[in-house]
Amino acid sequence: LVRLRRRLAGSNNALSRGLLTLLSRDRIDEETWEDFEDTLLTSDLGVKPTMELVEALRDRLRVEGTADPTAARTALREELIKLVDPTLDRSLAIDRTEVPAVVMVVGVNGTGKTTTVGKLARVLVAEDKDVVLGAADTFRAAAADQLETWGSRVGVPTVRGAEGADPASVAFEAVKVGIEGEADVVLIDTAGRLHTKTGLMDELGKIKRVIERQAPVTEVLLLLDATTGQNGLTQARIFAEVVDVTGVVLSKLDGSAKGGIVIQVQRELGVPVKLVGLGEGVDDLAPFEPEEFVDALLT
Ligand code: GDP
């Protein structure tokens, strides 16, 4: 929590600034509400959530008959947590049954897929799980090299193919290795070229189908780079159309973080943010906790 706070506080975040506008006044009047709304509209919270939030807060304070910033803060915290939705199930479906659990990691290049696979492997290894990595981004040799580097850093095997090999066959092989070695989890890194939607659909769909000849894909994690705002959201939407996403990983929440995207992406895609990336290091992956996230925004 301290780390998330520090990281979010260090970023010039329109959502945080908007919240602080509200909390820094002696009393809350019409002008405060307008400033608050204006600032939130420039954040990446989105128009509809902003309107809903402002309306819910105004209603609450009216009912409570107060214009006191402390009451506003409490109300704001609660309403934000509601928006982020603490009732969503954010656990990862990675329990081994007769075969290893298989996690596919998808998203546009540069969003942090390979890094997330590495960090997630580290988390799983720390939980005493046997992990196999599959480098199904065969388009660039550097991608497989990068994954292999993560594999050796974390101490897990990486299955890779020749450059230009069929990504689905590499994924198949990785799962096979996982089954033979009785691994708990197989993590599959994929390519994120977005030139055509059909191309992407064919590739990701095929990878999933081919994996599922041996073991069900239990999680499809979509990477979203928190610094890319609306643009990232548009791309995320395309991925969600071509493959059944089960959870979102919001990367780069450190740096120029735009935390409001959490609320939008969950609404748009109908899946929870499950993990957040807080840096480039091996330990910079954390479960997403709505209350902790909101507290970090309000600090
Ligand atoms: P991929 O192309 O989707 O596999 O993306 P990579 O995993 O190669 O990541 C792209 C860049 O983003 C790399 O330089 C990573 O170190 C960096 N990166 C990934 N996740 C995070 C994060 O949570 N925070 C920060 N600051 N950088 C990250």
Image (spheres, rainbow, N blue to C red):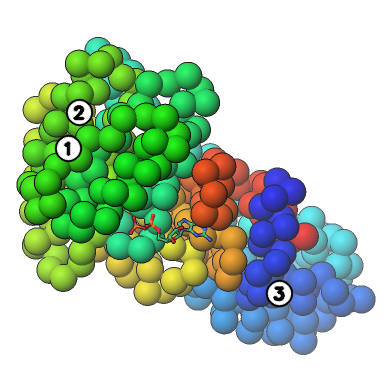
- Provide the secondary structure element on which disc 1 rests: helix
- Between discs 3 and 1, the one toward the N terminus: 3
* Residue located 16% across and 24% down the image: 176
- List the residue tagged with mark 2: 175
Q: Between label 2 and label 3, give the one nearer the viewer.
A: 2
Q: Nearer the viewer, residue 43 or 22?
A: 43
Quadrant of residue 5 within the rendered picture: bottom right
Measure the alpha-carbon separation of dots 2 and 1: 6 Å
Q: Quadrant of the C terminus?
A: bottom right
* Residues marked 2 and 1 touching at CB (< 8 Å): yes
Is the CB atom of the residue marked by disc 1 within 8 angstroms of ligand 1's nearest atom?
no
Measure the alpha-carbon separation of dots 3 and 1: 44 Å
* Residue located 77% across and 76% down the image: 21
* Residue located 52% across and 54% down the image: 280
Whether residue 63 sits left or right of residue 47 in the image: it is right
- Between discs 2 and 3, the one toward the N terminus: 3
- List the residue tagged with mark 1: 171
Quadrant of residue 134 within the rendered picture: top left
- List the residue tagged with mark 3: 17
Measure the alpha-carbon separation of dots 2 and 3: 46 Å
